[in-house]
Amino acid sequence: AGFALAATGALAAPPLSRRWGSGRVVAVAPLAAVLPAVLLAAPQVPAIAVGYCASYLLLGLGGPPAADLLHAATNAEVRSTMLSAESMTSHIGGITTSLLFGVVIASGGAAAAAMIACCFVIAAVVMLRR
């Protein structure tokens, strides 16, 4: 289900990028992911399901415009290096947050982890705007 929702978000990205611009779609996708993070911390099953679905949909939404911006910002000689660096940093970030959020959830609960994630997403959007 997650892959299908991510694919749906990726399909929606090109028309939204044409309408609003790739930069705005890239900036809005993680900011809108704050809602799923909060819903995932809720104890009710419907809220968790909505948060799960929205997370994957929004993850798919941000991918194509980010790739478009990376392609436009780099020349052919360094593009593959930038793609490799982007992939490596994504993996490092995923590993780090998986380890740290396990500790946060065990000690402070899922709501604390969701709030920390929201702070990081908002900080990332602020840095993208500069």
Image (cartoon, rainbow, N blue to C red):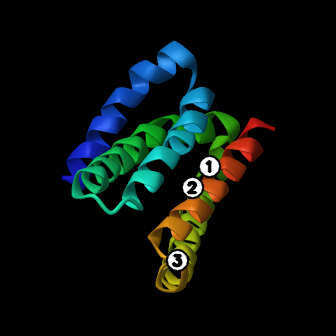
Q: Nearer the viewer, residue 87 or 93?
A: 93
Q: Amino acid at mark 2?
A: Leu
Nearer to us in this view, 108 or 7: 108
Residue 60 is situated, as x and y percent measured from the top left of the image, at 38, 43
Q: Residue at x 59, y 55 (%)?
A: 118
Distance between mark 3 and mark 1 Cα atoms: 32 Å
Residue 85, compared with residue 16, is above or below; it is below
Residue tagged 3: 101
Indicate the position of residue 64 as horizontal and vertical percent values.
Answer: 45, 38
Name the quadrant containing residue 108.
Answer: bottom right
Q: Which residue is mark 1?
A: 79
Please say if the residues under marks 3 and 1 sit with CB atoms less than 8 Å apart: no
Query: Real-space Cα distance between discs 2 and 1?
Result: 6 Å
First in sequence: mark 3 vs mark 1: 1
Along the line of sight, the residue nearer the viewer: 15 or 31: 31
Q: Amino acid at mark 1?
A: Arg
**As displayed, is residue 19 above or below residue 63?**
above
Identify the element where label 1 is drawn. Answer: helix
At a point 33% along the width and 63% down the height, the residue shown is 43
Q: Are marks 2 and 1 in contact (CB under 8 Å)?
A: yes
Element at label 3: helix
Total number of numbered discs in the rendering: 3
| Labels 2, 1: front one | 2
Tell me the crowding category of disc 1: few under 14, some 14 to 19, or many 20 or more residues within 10 angstroms, Cα based. Answer: some
Q: Which residue position holds label 2?
A: 83
**Mark earlier in primary sequence (3, 2):** 2
